[in-house]
Amino acid sequence: MKILHLIPSLRGGGIKTLVCVLANEMVREGHEVTICTISRPENTDYAYTWLDKRVKSRNLGKISIGFSLRELIKVVLFIKREPYDIINIHSYFYYYIFAILLLHSKVTFFYTVHNDAYQENTKWDKKVLWFKRWCFKHKWLHPITISKESKRSFYELYKCESTIIYNGISPIEFIPDRKILNPYKNTHKTKVFVHLGRITTQKNQVVLSKVFERLIKDGYDVKLLIIGKIQDEQIYQSIKAYISERIQYLGERSDAVLLLSGAEALCLPSLWEGMPMTILEALSVGCPVIASPVGGIPEAIQDGYNGMLSHDSSEEQFHSIMVRFLNMSEEQIMQMRENAKKSFAQYNIESTAKQYIETYVSVLNRNNQHYLF
């Protein structure tokens, strides 16, 4: 099967992680896979190094910031160069409106909703929401959601059904190292926590910083490492007010999963989510997750089993859940780490890729009645 994944870029966030590991698994299963980004790659786009050599990598050369009709036309011309059985688009729907409008009768389009259905519609997507609804309703575009909550919000917004396929990641290829964060400890007893996510309103890093500032003032021997690309400069400037020897911003890191293996827990007080890849990465290395109960997070994290869930995303509630975690015994936390590893089994990328292929084939067979692969 010839598959094209279209995505704005391979930088920042968990979407790029999913697209890369999904493409790798699909090509290992014998499919011909291309990833095409709208933006030209930058030297810091280390996700390209994750790709299997058999995955074709293309880009449309966008370097300017903001909306341009040029990119919409480029998408159409790129698709028309060679036939694809499947085109799976990711993020920023507006880039693909011309392609769907002009080519929907010739190509089968899928759209993965990587977040809450309302929240994933950014400025320009909101302007063409009426067309997006039309595409889903008339099956010009076939939706894939990533959690029960994602599916619920999708139906509420678009009044049509979607196929749930849970995110997955590749099994780790290194030995988790509990001592990897020792250089960051202020004392030999310091408990180091990691936050992994783009610097943006959604991830609620300002509240997280406030919570850790309170914990430090209360005498807890803790440290917070914030890892992720700066997407919102204003949010970053707000976080800088809390940066200290115990609250550090490390920027983007290609070894983030290895760092998670040494952390006490992943902290994620998000305001909204789909199914965060960072949670799956944490589970894969036996790192407990302390998170807010938004999006698909409660489907992956069971309070007291493989992590802890606050009642909401507020400062008070997240502070309360952190205090509760810090007062757990070492035996309880060790058991939580073991449970985290067990929880990862259902999020293996092999299962995710298999479900994507089965969904593609099901739609193709409905359309053509004779597709075989």
Image (spheres, rainbow, N blue to C red):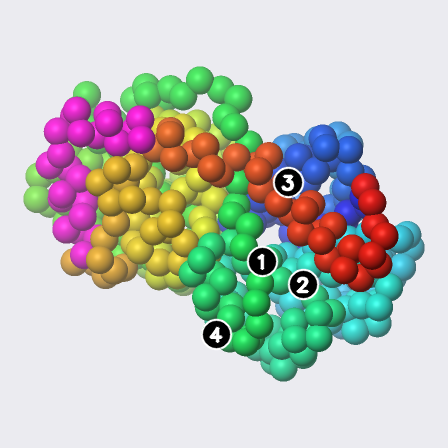
Left-right relation of 235 to 219:
right
Q: In this view, does 337 lie above or below 268?
A: above
Q: Residue 142 carries which label?
A: 2
Q: Do the residues labelled 2 and 3 touch (CB within 8 Å)?
A: no
Kind of residue indicated by mark 4: Glu
- The answer for how far apart the CA atoms under marks 2 and 3 are is 17 Å
- The answer for how far apart the CA atoms under marks 3 and 1 are is 13 Å
Q: Residue 354 carries which label?
A: 3
Q: Mark 1 points at which residue?
A: 163
Q: Which mark is residue 156?
A: 4
Q: Are marks 4 and 1 in contact (CB under 8 Å)?
A: no
Kind of residue indicated by mark 1: Thr
- Residue ID at (57%, 67%): 161
Kind of residue indicated by mark 3: Lys
For the residue labelled by badge 3, is the local secondary structure a helix, a strand or a loop?
helix
Q: Do the residues labelled 3 and 1 touch (CB within 8 Å)?
A: no
Left-right relation of 63 to 258:
right
Residue 84 visible from this viewpoint: no
Left-right relation of 193 to 171:
left
Name of the residue lying farthest toward the left: 218
Kind of residue indicated by mark 2: His
- Residue ID at (30%, 49%): 291
Q: Earlier in the sequence, mark 4 or mark 2?
A: 2
Q: Which of marks 2 and 1 is nearer the N terminus?
A: 2
- The answer for how far apart the CA atoms under marks 4 and 2 are is 16 Å
- Start-end of magenta stretch: 317-339
- The answer for how far apart the CA atoms under marks 4 and 1 are is 15 Å
